[in-house]
Image (cartoon, rainbow, N blue to C red):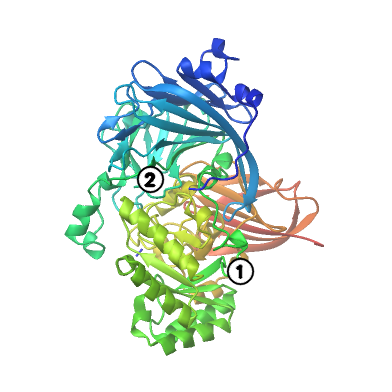
Amino acid sequence: MRNRDGKEHACSRRDFLSAVAAVPTFFSGLSVESAAAKGAVRIESPDGKIVFFLDANPTRLTYRVLRKSASVLEKSDAGIIIDGTDLGDRAEIKKVEPYNANEKYAWRGVHSIALNSFRGARINAIHGRSKTDFTVEVRVFNNGVAFRYIVPAKDDKPRTPDVATTFVLPAGSTAWFHDFTGHYEGVHVKKALADVRDGEWAASPMTAKLPNNDGYIAITEGALINYAGMGLRADGQNGFKGVLGHALPVSHPFELRYTKADIDRLAIPTTFIGTITTPWRVIMIGSDLNSLVNCDIINNVSPPPDTSLFPAGFATPWIRPGRAVWRYLDGGDSTFDGIKEFSRLAGDLGFEHNIVEGIWHRWTEDQMRELVDYSKQWNVGIWFWEHSKNLKTPDSRKVFFDQLNRVGVIGAKIDFFDHEAKEVIDQYQALLKDAAEHKIMLEFHGSNKPAGEMRTWPNEMSRESIRGMEYRSMSERATHDTTLPFTRFLAGHADYTPVHFGERRRETSWTHQIATAVVFTSSVMTYGAHPKSILDNPAADLIRSIPSTWDETRVLPPSEIGEMAVFARRKGTEWFLGVLNGSPSRTIRLPLSFLGRGTYDAMIVRDNIDDAAAERIENTTVAANRSLDIDIRPGGGFVGRFRPIGV
């Protein structure tokens, strides 16, 4: 089973000249027109640490990115291909229009307030031979870079775009990525850049650790609207080229999703009439994993929500983050009465949702209402699963969402997309819009990675696009779990369906499983375990108190991709500490300096070193000047909850 932009403020000419100038030092202080005439543009981040260079040399348009004078991306190709013509070939820069922004807005996920602060420019260029005008729009943030291409309409003739942009990493980098086997449900592999072969596929986001301790980057996209998604393909020379969705490999059993005619159609490049605007190409940059995890660029470049549909944004009353039970992975009666029992157990847990698989198709609407009304007694909302193939037309979507409204169902889990052609991307947008008009929350399974959709559509509560607990025969799950927070989760929320105490957990411990609910991010967190097994777990009190959204997230040492994830997360005045361990056993000391003043009641769940299917629970009092010594078994974990005393 699986564009409107943010608020912008024009900057003064003096502000711009400090941010945008020609690449060589002697260009500094030249006017915008002179800088453009020299064919080079330099844009600094607000803090001056990240610099983006765009260079129209005699051969082609290129770009590169530095952080503190160290190379983040080497000279890479810029431009867009239109009807087979690479507009970056012998392009000239004609005009530079600066702008910037500095704002905060409400968010949902790793933190509750997002920061959108950048220096940007719209750089008008022209292709040397065809004389085609186009714009490279760039924004440089303190933690990364985003750029996109805009090609104005021409004679109302259909045109076909393709990707000319490449991303060349510094030699000596180490990358984590998976190919498109299973679409976006692959296992990330760690590779030295020198070992990446020509032709290898990489699904975004692709994360890399830079040489010489120069930090980390992740490459992905944002504001994926009215366009095909982008994957990456290696050139065997430290570079990756963008590839649009119609040309990406497919490997899922597509008979469940599409006919052969569908597959053939989706492989045809999309033509456009009118202006062509690409999604933003996003390079997230961090000195450490904490800055990478807290990066807001993907949602910053995505359009804010329509206030007519979401009058209070993320606080719009019918949008309800929370925890969900799900009768699929861990047994339970699939009858109507069995599903009612899951709602009762969800209520006992204090969980907010019950996600119902396709069994609901066998029920009458009276039964659906009965389930909804019964569940409301426990403050539990009902979600129904549906296949995407049944929701391709406006009429079919209206029939479906009207029915959900009639019976009182508040959410839908839409499954089986597994393609990133523009037609499929358009369907996501149509579903989100139609659902919003009906005040229905959505999550997507069999899906592509998120690309900022939740900013525009706060009713998107999660999407799969991850190899989660549904994969029973998962080897090295602990390594996988300690890789995901720094790879796939950088793109946004994911429905991993975590926390399972049976054999699906493989080599991971019970404590590791509980910690995934703290470390992984999903606005609706669907638990894989049978709710009774959660209620019977010695750590049930702690599990029931883990929220699904956070006000603050801090990634702590000794976190390392594929080895350990240590997350301190705050909701209100409470802090949670979640530790996921990879393969070897470890002993670590964790300072509690993230806690505020005063003392805290702490509930602590530790590994039982001798038994992965057991835990050790402690209740104690701690303060910020304390440290915790933690012994962790292979595939183990640690969870702590800290409540301030007297607050």
Residue depicted at x 21% and y 63%: 255
What amino acid type is highlighted by mark number 1? Pro
Residue carrying label 2: 188
Quarter where residue 279 is shown: top left
Task: Give the alpha-carbon distance from disc 2 to disc 1, as whole Å.
Answer: 38 Å
Expressed as whole percent of the image width and height from the top left, the position of residue 353 reads 52, 73
Q: Residues within 10 Å of mark 2 (few under 14, many from 20)?
A: many
Residue carrying label 1: 317
Q: Is residue 589 visible?
A: yes
Quarter where residue 62 is shown: top left
**Of 555 and 229, the residue lying toward us:** 229
Q: Residue furthest left?
A: 260
User: Element under label 1?
Assistant: loop
Quarter where residue 322 is shown: bottom right
Quarter of the figure that contains the C terminus: bottom right
Quarter of the figure that contains the N terminus: bottom left
Residue depicted at x 47% and y 60%: 462
What amino acid type is highlighted by mark number 2? His
Expressed as whole percent of the image width and height from the top left, the position of residue 281 reads 43, 38
Expressed as whole percent of the image width and height from the top left, the position of residue 133 reads 38, 30
Q: Is residue 74 visible?
A: no
